[in-house]
Amino acid sequence: MIDLSNSRPFASGGNRHCYRHPQFADRCVKVMRPGRVAELRQRAPWYKGLADDSHFDDNAREVAGYRQKVLRTAPDDSPVWDHLPRWYGMTETSKGPGAVSELLLDAHGAPAETLETYLQRAGLDAPIRGALERFSQWLRATGVLTKNLLPHNLVVVSRGGQPELYLVDGLGNASFLPLSEHLAVSRRRYIERRIDKMWKRIHWEISDRNIPWKKAERL
């Protein structure tokens, strides 16, 4: 068991806290917020409330994301890992089940900044635009399936003197029917929709945000 009782999260999302692994400086441990699964179940429509706890557990969804075919069969030197943290599996912690993955670091050894923070600091400049194009091409070439590509779920890491993007959350298939897991045409269409929505979200992030994202997304 990993003891996190004296640790503070270096980052927190709506559902999970992220801790540095106490034994491995290059790994992070993601733990669901206490009571969050029950809270999400209570807020869900009645028909979704019939699902088991894994439907509301981000760690369970991350496990499923890493089990998709293109990752499950990928060797260590596969290009599928060029924009993804390495996966080390689930483990027990003092704060509940933890998902352990590679911790992406900046040049000073601190957790890498998110794309959201980068855009707030530097905007959509030429280096990050290039990183986004390379990330998009990687999705198309590898067929890795993701959910919506949100700026706070992508981190910016310097590789070879240029920024590269890594997806640290949101891996997996968001479709109700998993056709994109099995049919090449469905996979390509699915990925293009995710890339298109990613760019729309980025342009919203750097805009004056005079309308909420949910409304902008519908438009």
Image (cartoon, rainbow, N blue to C red):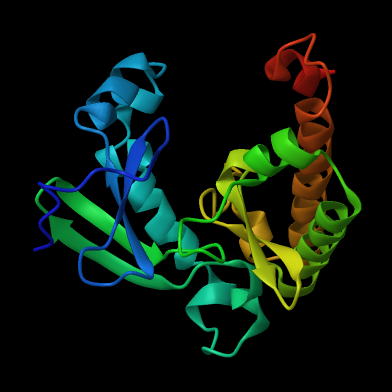
- Asked if one can make out residue 62 in the rendered structure from this viewpoint, the answer is yes
Above-or-below relation of 92 to 115: below
Front residue of 122/150: it is: 122
Q: Quadrant of the N terminus?
A: bottom left
Which residue sits at x=54%, y=74%?
A: 71
Q: Position of residue 105 (x, y in %)?
A: 50, 63
The answer to which image quadrant residue 106 occupies is bottom right
Task: Indicate the position of residue 161 as horizontal and vertical percent values.
Answer: 76, 73
Residue 150: image location, x then y, percent:
64, 40
Residue 39, given in percent of the width and then of the height, sits at 28, 21
Q: Residue furthest right?
A: 126
Q: Looking at the image, is 147 positioned above or below residue 112? A: above
Left or right of 196? Residue 83 is left
Q: Nearer the viewer, residue 174 or 142?
A: 142
Task: Identify the residue at image location x=34%, y=24%.
Answer: 40
Quadrant where the C terminus sits is: top right
Residue found 36% across the figure and 15% down from its top: 43
Q: Residue furthest top?
A: 210
The front one of 48 and 2 is 2
Which residue is depicted at the point 73% across and 78% down? 160
Q: Can the viewer see residue 150? A: no
